[in-house]
Image (cartoon, rainbow, N blue to C red):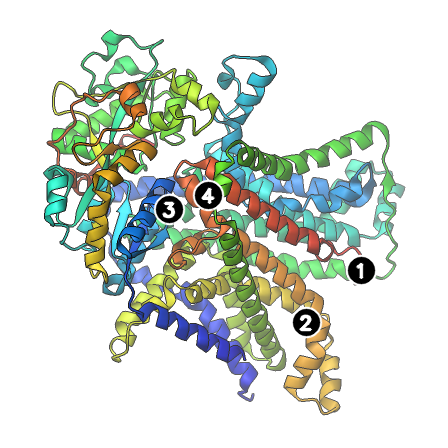
Amino acid sequence: MRINFWYISSFVISLFVIIPIITVFSSFFDNTSNYFQVLKDTFLMEYIFNSLILLVSVLILTFFIGTGSAYLVSFFNFPFSNFFKWALILSFAVPPYIYAYSLTAFFENYGTAYTILKNLFGEGNYNQIIPKFDGLLGVVLSISFSLYAYVYILARASFLYQSQNIIDLGKNLGFTKFKAFYSIILPAARPAIVAGLSLVAMETLAEFGAVDFFSINTLTTGIYNSWIAFDDLAFANQLSFFLLLFIFALFILENLSRKNAKYHFNTKAGFKQKQKIQLSGKKAFLAFSFCFLVFFLSFLFPLSQMMYWTIKFPENLFDLKILDLLMNTLYLVILSSLLLIIFGLISNYGNRVNKNKTLNILSTLSISGYAIPGVILAVAFITFIAWFDDSVIKNLGFVSIKKVFIGSILGLVLVYFIRFYSLAYNGIKSGYEKINISVDESSYLLGYSKRKTFMNIHIPFLRNSLLFVGILVSLEIIRELPITLILRPFNFETFATTAYISASEDLLEAAAVPSLFLILIATFFIIVTSKYILRDNND
Amino acid sequence: MRKISIITLIFSVIASSLAIANEVNVFNARHYKADSELYSKFTNMTGIKVNLINGKSGALEKRIISEGADSSADLYITADAGRCGAMDAKGALQGGLTSAAIKDAVPKSFRTNKWVGIAKRARIIYYSPERVTGAELSGMTYEGLADPKWKGRLVIRKSSNIYNKSLVASLIKNNGKAATAAWAEGVVANMARTPTGNDRAQIMAVAAGEADIAVANTYYLALMLSGKKGAEQQEAAKKVKAFFPNQNDRGTHMNVSCAALVKGAPNKANAVKLVEFLLTPESQEHFTNNTFEFPMIDGVSPSPLVVNNLGLDFKQDMKTKLASYGKNQAAAVEVMTAAGWK
């Protein structure tokens, strides 16, 4: 095996991304605990219990919403079914924390629901009859309506690839539609659905904004609090351990299901284009209602609540330096997605040309950054830099590097890099898998160097994958909250941080304007790229 | 090309952090519009630029401590004395807020040499005049919140809330830990619902008939009455009345927004100047009229909304040192958790 540029770059990139994971684990042996054992036991049970309840409820809800709507739009024609096909992914534009603000604004005592009832029916004590969606229920709804789209997109893609043949088979056996769905379509799509659900699960466990807003204690906020408020690294690590157990289980599940998914996707022999069933009458109405309800609850509801507030309290619109926020957001988005794409490419190519086990394991580990909550990554990054500075840099007699990394764009982008590296790496990898290795061999035979093969052959092939990765990463960064909150420089705000800060100060009305802009920009990104997300045609 | 741009980026970051500027770096956990208006005024008057990093107190504190002696932070401004006290306990602050201007302006129990109060708030009881009689409230104290007569009638925030931690810390300071532990159990038994929502949500719960009494800070009612939260909440606020507890003994529990001087502050002199500026009558008036807090200094009157609806003549607890909120914080959390206070 030869050590070359590609090998070293891939190695270094992967190693860099693993640093925070190593930091979390290495501080396992620290013992700074000064907290009471009784409290810890009480909290530990509460954190685990809340995380479990949250996880299970969100998974059930996203499964029903995601697969249900994907099934309807993939197998049937009904009014607006083509509109819903892409409208249902717009929920991605509304991060869970903004959904949480909307829920509270609408349902709280004397909230928007109260105003509507008062305007419709006159004075009355409506507060008693308006349901309250706060606490754990509020978090479950906020996360589910924002993230079900993962399940929807993957389930729909899988449904599309299913051949008419097996559905006909069901018909010939005399299955009802429900039975066909339950015993043929669903099992065939299982790997894709499990992959979607495990993404939902990871995001749920990592969720910070909405959980913090409703002050529910989960493992993630527990780690944050014991680390940050009580300086109790030992307890924080104990919690991290439980959280990582959860995450690794999901990670393995996701990887397994992805492997299985390939078999299903590739059964092209005897593939017969599916016929969509035309629905009419009551059935068409029911299908329409279901999709409309999902679309309304996940997107229109938060959007209109934020718009209503922006109009009701217009002074907030003029208080914000919207152009600054926009430039800051775009600056982060462009810088980070460029870095991620460039290094994701190098690393993928490095792996392709060097079939090396160490490198392979390192790459697999390095993509677990996505599974680690942003809050924890950010704090681990600070801890690592502080340690490195105090014990290495200063001993060598250099000037402190803390300011270069903590509270700077550089540090912020680096941690984004760690967090979203797996999106870039896997996105590019799936593109690479479609380029047959014989293409590389032919290129070498023609006398192309590795670099030339990479630049002139691979990159043009990968153009669509790169665009898709860029958009995914951009969407994530626009919505990203905890890392930006902890690591951003002085006088630097984004739409997400502005919304969060207003909300945490009980100024939800003021959070509406930045939230609205965030939704609009993300919606724009989604609409522009919906055709890549919803690839209808087989490649 | 890529390498060059990364190197330039690194150098520009280093250069900007080393450049000497007439500035003061504020780690700010108070995010009122009124505050940023005051900072601009300060810059206009003195030429000192105020750099802000806004965030939640926990994350800001962690960052200041991790950065240690190299921290760029000069001042840490936050909305609870318990937090300033906790930062002091972690050794992250330094003395120096000792100028005559500061000492003359702020009463002794509301400052240390490392942090000073810049605006006051009281944590009080709100009640529904329809459902709570004057006799029931007569002589009411914080201690009285545990009285079984309030069973199923009380709302208060979660135990993780810093205002509650400081209130309970002050009770521990005055009554001891054992008595406060018993008190917390009584309070939990009286709760009308599992704690949820912010201070304003507690007041609205009383207005909406979910509970008869609520514990919340003073400025929230004024904020609702001001109409800044919309007409509905303005109406709701009129359905509740404020009551100041412990008038016959030590006085009502007071808290402050505080400014703390960070250890290793690169612009210490400017930081002291900013604190002095925040304590001038002009700034204090700006606070009272916009955030509806009580002024820290004598000679400035609270907002008319506060004066007319909450009253001005109440006895403040000037005896319990605010520094004890930070010291008793861990015990307060322990007491509340043990009582099953969510």
Residue annotated with mark 4: A319
Q: Residue at (64%, 68%) from the top-left corner?
A: A428
Of the image marks 4 and 1, the number of the one nearer the N terminus: 4
In whole angstroms, how far apart are the C-alphas of marks 3 and 1?
Answer: 45 Å
- CB atoms at circles 3 and 4 under 8 Å apart? no
Q: Position of residue B196 (x, y in %)?
A: 40, 30
- CB atoms at circles 3 and 1 under 8 Å apart? no
Chain assignment, label 4: A
In whole angstroms, how far apart are the C-alphas of marks 2 and 1?
Answer: 17 Å
Residue annotated with mark 3: A222
Q: Position of residue A66 (x, y in %)?
A: 67, 43
In whole angstroms, how far apart are the C-alphas of marks 2 and 4?
Answer: 47 Å
In whole angstroms, how far apart are the C-alphas of marks 4 and 1?
Answer: 49 Å
Q: Residues within 10 Å of mark 4 (few under 14, many from 20)?
A: few
Q: Residues within 10 Å of mark 3 (few under 14, many from 20)?
A: many
> In the picture shown, does residue B179 fall above or below A65?
above
Confirm whether circles 2 and 1 share one chain.
yes
Element carrying mark 1 = loop
Q: Position of residue A491 (x, y in %)?
A: 39, 55
Q: Residue at (73%, 86%) from the top-left corner?
A: A443
